[in-house]
Image (spheres, rainbow, N blue to C red):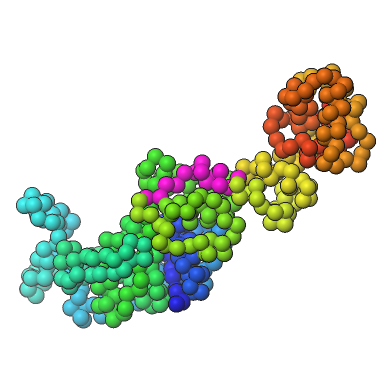
Amino acid sequence: MSATVRFAPSPTGRLHAGNIRTALFNFLLGRKAGGSLVLRLDDTDKERSTEEFAESIREDLAWLGLDWTQEVRQSDRFALYRVAVERLKAGGRLYPAYETPDELELKRQLQLARGRPPVYDRAALKLTAEEKAKLEAEGRKPHWRFLLEPRDVVWDDLVRGRQHVDAASLSDPILVREDGTYLYTLPSVVDDIDLGITHVIRGEDHVANTAPQIQLFEALGAAPPAFGHHNLLVGPDGQALSKRERSNSISGLREEGIEPMAVASYAAIIGTSDPVAPHASLDALIEAFDFGKLSRAPARFDPHELRLLNARLLHALPYEAVAARLRALGASGGPAFWITVRGNLAVLGDARHWWRVVEGPLAPVIEEPALCRAAAELLPPEPWDGETWSIWSNAVKQATGAKGKALFQPLRLALTGEEHGPELKHLVPLIGRARAAARLNGKIA
Ligand code: GLU
């Protein structure tokens, strides 16, 4: 089975973790099936769509490694939508309706008051040619509704299982507004047909669109694709994710220094039965990916949990995976440095701090001057290695009688300026004798 999938954001804002889950699921399904991913920019809303947002979407996808094979913009494709509109009109599936929003609201209220479902009553279908002409002479312009066939629509949702919707219980959806602009439904279906989309993977907020869309595929002479509607994200408080919160946006996470694979791993795992653990590569995620693992309950996106996952990912990264980025940070300490400090990093950029601790200049913190001076005297000659620290600290213990925290804490503070950090056993050989001696004597080095 080969799959052609699409990710279809509107370029009206930055992508957040919820959007990226949709992109990722499409990508993973596409890759697993050896297919391709189309980036479709749903920019029919010309007022709110901007090139800047389109570019930030491309940047975010590229940063995560979610490659796409083709990009299309709906604003380039109006000619196709017009053809579809004519075809639907010719087939009697698209009809003009003239009610104003206020009139529709009134009808709705009346239906509800009578205990009936607020389904559009199709009054417009009964209008005669004269009545229509009269309304238009009054200056009314029609919007256009898709005539649903009153039958059961069934699809096997890749996430939710078999779905049944009685189309008779739905309002005929408006496809074209009175100013001639399109609502999302028609362009989406026309594009899915034109681009040969085989699987539509999207959030479950679109479940309600699916039955009308399936009828629309059929009315346009196409077989509907497979559909999968994944659970949506909520924040730690159980509320829908705020788009305004910078820490939820992908670019915000990138600027914070979170690793792309931490974001991808987290986005793919939350809301599934898998334990939250980092995956080293997209290939590993492809391997683990299975819609069957997705829960029906909302997935909880907790930025704190993502940061912890990011740290776990870093702690396991081999030197080769980060060498170029360490050099770019000016932390050119080599594999020994990386292995020493990686367990203490929240984000890779923190390596810069530990490189300064190694290389200096660093202002030592001297809490026990006498102990530190004695320790400086006892520093063994170089070369230093993994044994140096225990030989030296034992000698200091013998000479001063200090032990445990009372010994190690003043030495750590003098050597690193910090109360916590990487194991001194590994750090001390990197700092080296000259700097260690100077720092123990209270000098910046
Ligand atoms: N632009 C739509 C959205 O972002 C696409 C929905 C779909 O995938 O069909 O919600």
Where is residue 353? Give x, y as percent: 71, 39
Residue 261 appears in the figure: yes
Q: Which residues are magenta?
A: 298-311
Where is residue 410? Give x, y as percent: 76, 24
Residue nearer the viewer, 154 or 96: 154
Q: Quadrant of residue 419?
A: top right
Where is residue 190? Give x, y as percent: 34, 74
Q: Quadrant of residue 383?
A: top right
Residue sitting at x 81%, y 37%: 428
Residue 443 appears in the figure: no
Q: In the displayed structure, does residue 187 sit left or right of residue 2?
A: left
Q: Is the residue 388 above or below the residue 112 in the image?
A: above
- Secondary structure mainly formed by the magenta segment: helix
Residue sitting at x 79%, y 27%: 411
Where is residue 417? Give x, y as percent: 74, 29
Q: In the displayed structure, does residue 252 sit left or right of residue 46?
A: right
Residue 42 lies in the magenta stretch: no
Residue sitting at x 30%, y 61%: 207
Q: In the displayed structure, does residue 402 sit left or right of residue 238?
A: right
Residue sitting at x 25%, y 67%: 211
Residue nearer the viewer, 319 or 124: 319
Q: Quadrant of residue 162?
A: bottom left
Q: Quadrant of the C terminus?
A: top right
Residue 310 lies in the magenta stretch: yes
Residue nearer the viewer, 189 or 319: 319
Q: Is the residue 247 above or below the residue 224 in the image?
A: above
Q: Quadrant of the N terminus?
A: bottom left
